[in-house]
Image: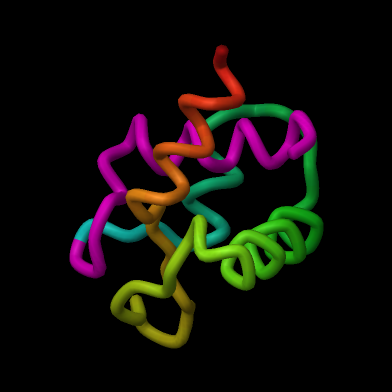
Amino acid sequence: MNRLGFIILSILRQEGATNKLSSMTVREIASAEEFGIKENTIFKKIKDFEQSGYICRGLKEGRAATFYITPEGCECLEREKQ
């Protein structure tokens, strides 16, 4: 887990993206906080977390994929805060 990963998981939980209906697009995640990271970089980190089971895909918004934090992702976030 690096700083970017922690920020992404934090944003998803803070914004209430915890299920398929309340999921967020990469653009929404990028604009939630101004941390100067390109959307492509965020997408790559999300893909890593998707493989780890910390993030899942939600319902599509137009043509854009959406993502939400899983319970495992919340647990990981809490472990990293310790």
Quarter occupied by the N terminus: top right
> Residue 41, percent across and down?
80, 56
Tell me, yes or no, whether the highlighted magenta stretch contains residue 3: yes
* Looking at the image, residue 3 lies above or below residue 41: above
Residue at horizontal 34 percent and vertical 76 percent from the top: 61
Residue at horizontal 35 percent and vertical 30 percent from the top: 14
Residue 43 falls in image quadrant: bottom right
Tell me, yes or no, whether the highlighted magenta stretch contains residue 40: no
* Looking at the image, residue 60 lies above or below residue 11: below
Which residue is more in the foreground, 21 or 18? 18
In the picture as drawn, the residue positioned furthest to the top comes out as 82
> Residue 42, percent across and down?
71, 54
Quarter occupied by the C terminus: top right
Q: Using residue 79 as the reference point, say whether residue 44 is left or right of it.
A: right
* Looking at the image, residue 58 lies above or below residue 4: below
Q: Using residue 25 as the reference point, say whether residue 46 is left or right of it.
A: right
> Residue 18, percent across and down?
27, 51
Color style of the picture? rainbow
Residue at horizontal 72 percent and vertical 28 percent from the top: 35
Residue 19 falls in image quadrant: bottom left
> Residue 49, percent across and down?
62, 60
Q: Using residue 80 as the reference point, say whether residue 20 is left or right of it.
A: left
* Looking at the image, residue 69 lies above or below residue 9: below
Residue 52 falls in image quadrant: bottom right
In the picture as drawn, the residue positioned furthest to the left comes out as 21
Q: Which residues are magenta?
A: 1-21
